[in-house]
Amino acid sequence: MITISGVSPDRIKQLLQERPFELFSIVTSDGSDIPVLSNELAFLYQGGHTLQVIAPKFKGATEEGNFDEHRIDVFLITNVVSPPIKQPGKRPKK
């Protein structure tokens, strides 16, 4: 597991442009972690202040309503962890 601290907009941009793309999680200052499963599901706004990430709610999600949209202030990202903290697409326990 690789953890990157002190994340900047330039570092996020670099992670999204890496080829081949490697899955990672974003950890925010409130302790939330958001998996970034594809560079096609993440968008860094001009200026680098806001990152938008679309993440599935559960494994096999295909419908629009099965995804969450996250808008993240890049300056509130405390760590980037690769591979993702949560395994992508696992169904929540009932």
Image (spheres, rainbow, N blue to C red):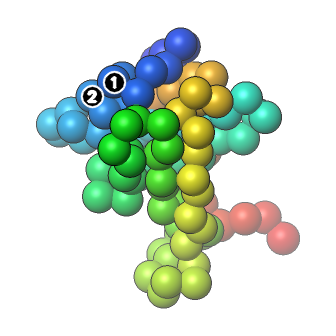
Residue type at tag 2? Gln
The answer to whether residue 57 is left or right of residue 54 is right
Question: Where 80 falls versus 67 (above or below)?
Answer: above
Q: Residues within 10 Å of mark 1 (few under 14, many from 20)?
A: few
Q: Can I make out residue 17 in this image? A: yes
What secondary structure is marked by label 1? helix
At 58% from the left and 56% from the top, the residue drawn is 70
Q: Can I make out residue 87 in this image? A: no
- Give the Cα separation between the discs numbered 1 and 2: 6 Å
Residue type at tag 1? Asp
At 53% from the left and 13% from the top, the residue drawn is 6
Out of 72 and 92, give the one closest to the viewer: 72
Farthest residue toward the left? Answer: 19
At 47% from the left and 45% from the top, the residue drawn is 51
Q: Residues within 10 Å of mark 2 (few under 14, many from 20)?
A: few
Residue 54, horizontal then vertical, whole percent = 48, 62
Out of 70 and 80, give the one closest to the viewer: 70
At 48% from the left and 75% from the top, the residue drawn is 60
Tell me the quarter of the picture where residue 12 sits: top left
Instruction: Find disc 2 in the rendering and name its residue.
Output: 14
Residue 88, horizontal then vertical, whole percent = 51, 54
Instruction: Find disc 1 in the rendering and name its residue.
Output: 10
Question: Where 79 falls versus 43 (above or below)?
Answer: above
Out of 92 and 28, give the one closest to the viewer: 28
Residue 1, horizontal then vertical, whole percent = 49, 21
Residue 33: mark? none
Out of 14 and 73, give the one closest to the viewer: 73
Q: Are marks 1 and 2 in contact (CB under 8 Å)?
A: yes
The answer to whether residue 59 is left or right of residue 32 is left
The quarter in which the C terminus is drawn is bottom right
